[in-house]
Amino acid sequence: MARSRRTGAAGGPRPECCSGRVGLLVRVLLLSCAAVLVCLAATSGPPEAKPSWSLALADDLPVTLSKGTLLGHPPSTEATTPAATTLPTTSIGAATANRDLGTSLPQHEDAGGEPAIIRYTLPARQTSLDIDLVVAAFSENLSWVEPMLARVSPGAELRLYCKGPKLNDPRCLRIDNYGGEEYAYLTHITHFYDELAPITVFTLGSIYNEDWYWLKCRKLNFVLSQIDTPEKRQSFSGFVTMAHQAPDSFMEFEGYFQLKSYRNHAGGQNTAACRASITPLDKWFERFIPVNLTIARHTGVLYNPIFAVSREKIRQYPKSMYETLLKEILRCTAKEHEGVAEAGHYLERAWKPMFETYRPLAIKCSGHFGQKKGDPFCCNQTGTIGLPWTICTEGRPTCSGLVDGSGWGTCIPPDWGWREDRCPASITAGRTGRHSRRLRQMDLSWA
């Protein structure tokens, strides 16, 4: 078969007189490139090994997980979103930076150019105490701490993480102002992983916020009401939260969620957010959290992350997982991204699937997207909204968690008793906020 002749830039035949010289030049270039590749291969180290994690599910069968292959899900082939800062992508095994409290300049990168975990010098916790109250604070009024801490005392200790220099409180454990509350939470977990309290309560500092009828205060008070006696602590299930506006309320895991931009306030300028290393939420969750998405869709999510969790629940995942999450947050350390890291919003939605007990017979508690089948543990009490819904069974007869008779709640057993949902008078006393009168009129008790 005759070979076609190559053409030049103008489309005509390549001149024959130059073919020998050109061929020699091409061969020289190829040999040079090969030599460069050999040198690079000789100087580069072996590829980094992916971590393996082991997680026992309800059937007690251990499942081996590698980063990117989570409970039967193949590694994601989605293109990752480039970081909004100049810091490179995180990786397990990056060096850490030791740092005393009060030092001014953190170390953002290690010698290899990767984000470094900042190791703060933190006072040792009292190992005899049952509860650590971890507070992520910035510039809030913290006079609520004493009455709330008294509810679970004696036996509880305050760990007040103050971001930035604005709070002048002698109890402050000062950390850098990176991300949102998740930076304080992860700093505590990674620092005290081997000596965690039997129960850790994580909360925001803005408990005096009166929005949604003192919602954050009600959330924290509900959580504390579940562990405020030795008997309750002894029978603690390992995780408790108030997902949204009422105990037992249900909020969906919306895997399509992304945070491309944000406004600091209503009508404010729209600003690009610091993007996560992979989006949207479901892809990020599969990359960083060794929990099947089916479980996440079943448990739902929580907002305004206030919850209590046992050390056993925290330690069911290796310390390296929390360090990897911390490095993901540290990708967004530029001042313009303080508090608006997309990964922080993803982690807010991951806490509940990470720690809530998996119920293997449940499917999904939902109705917003036309599911054919509901979750037998979840319910709503109105048939007028045109959505699939579940009637509570005899074993779990009470539909708890609805607000004004709408939304989605949880079918709870009769022995769960009173579900306290109020902000204590010790917090609201003397406050003249816009919701105080309305709060006094509300019956915030759940049978």
Image (cartoon, rainbow, N blue to C red):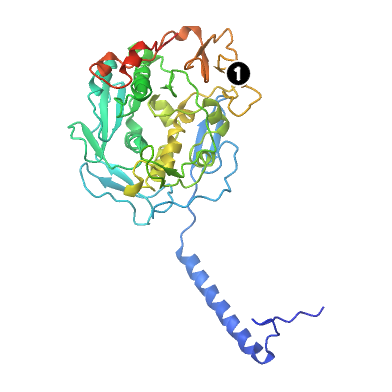
- Which residue is located at x 59 percent, y 39 percent? 73
| Residue 195 in picture, x, y percent from top left | 32, 30
Asked if residue 262 is positioned above or below residue 404 in the image, the reply reads: below
From the viewer's perspective, is 434 left or right of 53?
Answer: left
Task: Give the image location of residue 178, x and y in percent.
Answer: 33, 43
The residue lying at 42 percent from left, 31 percent from top is 315
**Depth check: 38 or 9 in front?**
9
Q: Secondary structure at mark 1?
A: loop
Q: Which x, y percent locates residue 233?
A: 36, 16
Position of residue 303 in the picture relative to residue 33 (left or right): left
Q: Amino acid at mark 1?
A: Trp
Q: Quadrant of residue 322?
A: top left
Q: Which residue is mark 1?
A: 389
Dividing the image into 4 quarters, which one contains the N terminus? Answer: bottom right
Q: Is residue 192 visible?
A: yes
Residue in the image at 51% along x and 50% along y: 80
**Residue 125 x, y percent position in the rendering:** 26, 29
